[in-house]
Image (spheres, rainbow, N blue to C red):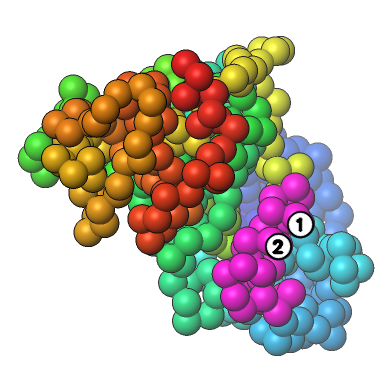
């Protein structure tokens, strides 16, 4: 009807072709095409011939249905990105990520993403690997009906994961293990970034600042290594590790299920030998500067640093009370007795303990508290020799 009005006005010389085209919001050349089609076929000539016709690029119905069945039967709950990689690599899929996402969302198999929150200023990555290490834990159903904690230690500059393993519950020992694996693999790093978990920090009041003057066992170990600790005060401050866990939660449970892994020992072996190398190869980024801030670990007694240290006073019978055990100090040629002496008890990850008087090793004990004179480690012998 709008065209007929413009066409009649042009025929009656009341509008020029340019004015009539402007009325229809088209160019003069398009208006002249409309005139030719109208004069040849009437109003039907103006109808877009593409209307009601199927696009030549439209996917066949069978392909769409097979995609939906593939996702529902084999990859239900996989993220779209993870499923799209599998779809292309193992099922010879040729469609784009956007096409796959739209098909799955239209079928109701995948929820549409939530709208992003308010704008936040992004913290730039450290320029060199080894300048800052993140450590965090994620409690999740990594295996069906089993809630485990995944401890991840990663580099801020590259997002390279140096250590990752499952435990029943995170704590001091799991955090020390993550640090130890990083130290042994790369060397000493400059700073350590974490949340305010009670094994990392003492916090006098809930929600208040951490007490840096009163370190935990973990904090004391970092001080001995010369590593600075940084506390995060919000989930947003740990955004980089939070996003990493989001990716891991979307991929790792599916990979474990795909390989029929149901126990923690097998899961940790799969994580170390297969999953992490492939994951790092895909998600690791290049540091902005060349080089490394890691320092070689030379002659460091890790066993006697990454442990629990407690001060005790020796009883009159030359025994030390520790965790319901009475540790008998053997007779030495250096002094008659150690009654009332201040000593330090080192508890190691395997449950064994050692007693030190200054740098001197007085005794090494098994998990039951029995003296093991022949089981002194090389590092402890070095400590005994000063």
Q: Secondary structure at mark 2?
A: helix
As displayed, is residue 109 above or below residue 363?
A: below
Residue at the location (26% across, 38% down)?
A: 310
Residue at 29% from the left image edge and 33% from the top image edge: 344
357 relative to 122 in the view: left or right:
left
Give how far across and how far down residue 200 sits, in percent: 31, 39
Above or below for 345 versus 83: above
Give how far across and how far down residue 267 sits, in percent: 63, 67
Magenta residues span: 251-278
| Residue 143 versus residue 308 in the image, above or below | below
Point 30% across, 47% down: residue: 328
Q: Is residue 199 magenta?
A: no
Magenta span: chief secondary structure: helix
Residue 11 can be seen in this image: no
Would you name the residue on which mark 1 appears?
A: 274
Give the image location of residue 96, x and y in percent: 79, 58
Which quadrant of the structure image shows residue 375?
top right
Residue tagged by mark 2? 270
């Amino acid at each position: 009807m709008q065209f007929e009005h413009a066409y009649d006005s042009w025929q009656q010389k009341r509008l020029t072709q340019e004015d009539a085209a402007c009325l229809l919001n088209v160019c003069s050349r398009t208006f002249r095409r409309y005139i030719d089609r109208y004069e040849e076929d009437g109003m039907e000539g103006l109808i877009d011939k593409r209307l009601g016709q199927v696009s030549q690029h439209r996917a066949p119905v069978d392909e769409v249905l097979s995609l939906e069945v593939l996702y529902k039967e084999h990859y239900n709950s996989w993220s779209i990105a993870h499923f799209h990689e599998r779809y292309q690599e193992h099922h010879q899929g040729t469609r784009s990520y956007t096409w796959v996402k739209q098909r799955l969302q239209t079928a109701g198999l995948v929820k549409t993403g939530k709208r992003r929150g308010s704008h936040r200023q992004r913290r730039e990555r450290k320029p060199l690997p080894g300048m800052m290490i993140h450590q965090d834990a994620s409690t999740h159903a990594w295996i069906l009906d089993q809630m485990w904690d995944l401890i991840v230690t990663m580099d801020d500059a590259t997002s390279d994961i140096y250590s990752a393993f499952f435990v029943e519950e995170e704590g001091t020992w799991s955090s020390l293990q993550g640090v130890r694996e990083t130290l042994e693999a790369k060397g000493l790093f400059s700073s350590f970034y974490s949340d305010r978990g009670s094994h990392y920090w003492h916090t006098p009041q809930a929600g208040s600042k951490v007490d840096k003057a009163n370190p935990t066992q973990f904090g004391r170990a970092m001080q001995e290594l010369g590593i600075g600790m940084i506390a995060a005060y919000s989930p947003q401050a740990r955004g980089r590790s939070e996003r990493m866990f989001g990716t891991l939660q979307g991929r790792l449970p599916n990979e474990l299920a795909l390989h029929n892994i149901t126990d923690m020992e097998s899961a940790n072996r799969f994580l170390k030998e297969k999953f992490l190398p492939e994951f790092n190869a895909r998600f690791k980024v290049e540091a902005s500067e060349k080089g490394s801030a890691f320092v070689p670990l030379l002659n460091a007694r890790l066993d006697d640093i990454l442990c629990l240290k407690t001060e005790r006073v020796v009883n009159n019978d030359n025994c030390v009370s520790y965790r319901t055990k009475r540790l008998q100090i053997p007779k030495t040629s250096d002094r008659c007795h150690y009654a009332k002496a201040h000593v330090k008890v080192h508890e190691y990850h395997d449950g064994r303990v050692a007693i030190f008087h200054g740098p001197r090793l007085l005794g090494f004990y098994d998990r039951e508290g029995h003296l093991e004179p022949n089981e002194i480690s090389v590092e402890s012998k070095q400590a005994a020799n000063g």
